[in-house]
Amino acid sequence: MYYPDREEAGRRLAAELQRWRGADPVVVALPRGGVPVAAPVARALRAPLDICVIRKLGVPFQPELGMGAIGEGGARVVNDAVVRGARVSPEQLAEVEREERAELERRAERYRRGRSPVPLAGRTVIVVDDGVATGSTALAACRIVRARGAARVVLAVPVAPQDWAARLGGDVDDLVCPHTPARFWAIGEFYTDFSQTSDAEVIALLDEAAARQQQPEDPEITLEAGGVELLGVLTRPQDALGLVLFAHGSGSGRLSPRNRYVAGELNRAGLATLLFDLLTPAEEIDREKVFDTELLGRRLAEVTRLVTARPDCAGLPVGYFGASTGAAAALRAAAEPGLRVAAVVSRGGRPDLAGPVLGGVSAPVLLIVGGADRTVLELNRRAEAQLGAPASLAVVPDAGHLFEEPGALEAVAALAADWFAQHLSPVAR
């Protein structure tokens, strides 16, 4: 098993942690790499997200040898055996701790930007990192959150060696890891993208999590489709112009930060949105189902019939926003007989995976592709010629497949909002 990136690893880890959703947990990440893994976990559990900033206390004349660790709120753990063996005096220990605590406070302030730490006393605390190698850092973090008053400590990582439970189990109440390979050299070998997480990314994810805690979220709804229960979030502004259903790609779901951002912009433009999971957590780890666009298209069509039968959505014109492989699912659903789909938008999509149904799509289609995403751009150009509906290709200059470049996702949201406003409005109908 390989993870494309930390965000995807966090999404899969979240599926393993659903049993703690009702336990009012706190998700605590080890910066920096643990934060993009922990963010999807916190969203899925509807839990606050915080960081566990720790500093190793190194022996004065041999700093690489740890004699303890410190955390916020005065928390500290000291290895007395190392202190005695290295003959470190109380004065020396105090001096090292004083220096490291100053650095700890500086880093915590940089990441939280003035926010207080989330209280841990009496709570279930889920400690998240991007993986465990030796386990020393994770162990220190678990001991620190315990020292800060955590009633139950859960250590959750996407990947770890097979013997990780033997190394850490004595200091942790629960261990969760989806992947424990027999051959283990380094955490990074199990990620396609294991690039360094920046301070800016950590700050942005913590800011997003803090803002989410301040605002009540739309309640989740359960949709029964294809014999399974799918979770979704329906947001309906007053006097909504129409309803846009999101078809996520590559095993993503309702918690996708990119699609959540686009949905928020559509809400501000007066459009209702439904972000929902096309697959159950158990199905998401099956790569065949992830790329089964025929199955995903059927589910999207069935969910469309269900949601448009609700009193709060009845009569609203329907649009689809498909990302990556989800674009093929959206086009398949749009070609379903009897479904009145008014418009489709594809973001970095793979319309070619919709195959022979392209000619049966009657709804106007906007294909948005990054200029630097050359292979997908060519696939979209070919699909544009095969579509039976009016189609337009919009290229966001210099953007890659995920539209991570500054201003790229904002451009996608603006293009989508304009397209849906044009084709879902009463005048267009």
Image: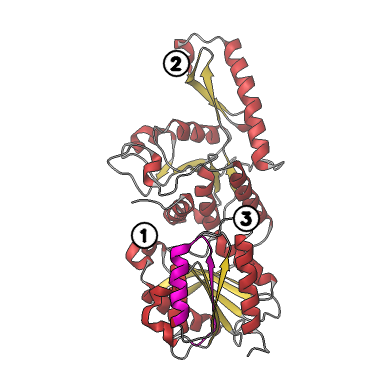
- Amino acid bearing label 1: Ile
The residue wearing badge 2 is: 81
Dot 2 amino acid type = Ala
Which labelled disc corresponds to residue 285? Answer: 1
Please state which of residues 314 and 285 is positioned toward the viewer in this rendering: 285
- Find the residue positioned furthest to the left: 182
| Between marks 1 and 3 in the image, the one whose residue lies nearer the viewer | 3
Question: What residue did someone put label 3 on?
Answer: 406
- Which sits earlier in the primary sequence, circle 3 or circle 2? 2
Judging depth in this view, the residue of 246 and 346 nearest the camera is 346
Q: Is residue 371 above or below residue 239?
A: above
Q: Amino acid at mark 3?
A: Pro
Please tell me whether residue 22 is drawn above or below residue 123 in the rendered image. Answer: below
Residue 279 coordinates in the image, percent (x, y): 42, 68
Q: Is residue 366 magenta?
A: yes
Which of the marked residues, 2 or 1, is nearer the chain's N terminus? Answer: 2
Judge depth for marks 2 and 1 and give the one in front: 1
Residue 289 placement (x, y as % from top left): 35, 67
- Which portion, as a residue range, is magenta? 362-385
**Which residue is pictured at 41% across the width and 33% down the height?**
135
